[in-house]
Amino acid sequence: MAKTAAKKAAPAASPAVERRPALAGRTISATGAKVEVLAPAERISLRAPEASLAALSKALGVTLPKKPKTSVSKGGRTALWLGPDEWMIIDEAGKDPLADCAKISALHSAVGISHRNVAISVAGPAAAAAINSGCPQDLSLEAFPVGAASRTILGKAEIVLLRTAQDAFRVECWRSFSDYVFTFLSEGARDAAA
């Protein structure tokens, strides 16, 4: 009986996996407010004591704000104050803030959250009313001026809210809640138009 060597088949090349952005291309326009998904950005959650802020600010190229409800932007990078020792850093210029933080030895914790978050823009004269359909935050210009930022809620989802202009906001939410948040904001925009 002749023995035949079994030929092992070469493993098939697996197709390249491409991550599709959540809500890619979704946008709605209602009278007074437009809701649209923003382009992906690099983000980190940053925690640090007061003694580390100067070194971190220098490494990030933006002065970390120290006052509640504030943000600072420079060169496509925005730092949002979220707590006494907590910031969210958003980079829309294609640079990696996590790599910038890794260059310094000052005590800090920086965690990449780009994959976790989705950003939604709400803009137009009825933008604040659309957001207030599910958010208790006072969005009057006096209480929440341009550059103001806070962690709050929209319906049943936690969001981070940034006022980018008199009639424009950036809503950051977790990817898993993005469809809910987008739909909530879309309904709020339609209701504000009525």
Image (tube, grey):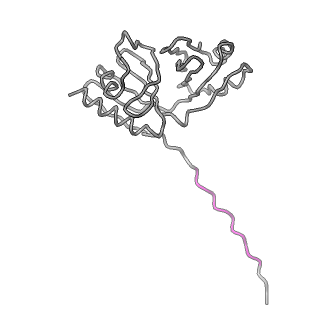
Q: Does residue 125 appear to the left or right of 75 in the view shown?
A: left
Q: Which residues are magenta?
A: 5-16
User: Residue 42, located in which quarter of the rendered image?
Assistant: top right
Q: Does residue 32 appear to the left or right of 20 in the view shown?
A: left
Q: Position of residue 178 (x, y in %)?
A: 43, 37
Residue 11 belongs to magenta span? yes
Q: Does residue 63 appear to the left or right of 6 in the view shown?
A: left
Height in image: 130 above or below 179? above
Q: Return the residue found at the far top.
A: 142
Residue at 67% in and 18% down: 59
Q: Position of residue 109 (x, y in %)?
A: 66, 26
Q: Return the residue found at the far left.
A: 194
User: Residue 94, located in which quarter of the rendered image?
Assistant: top right
Q: Quadrant of the C terminus?
A: top left
Kindly report the secondary structure that dominates the magenta region of the rendered protein.
loop
Q: Quadrant of the N terminus?
A: bottom right
Height in image: 135 above or below 72? below
Does residue 78 appear in this view? no
Residue at 45% in and 29% down: 159
Q: Position of residue 190 (x, y in %)?
A: 26, 31
Q: Position of residue 133 (x, y in %)?
A: 31, 27
Height in image: 134 above or below 143? below
Height in image: 108 above or below 180? above
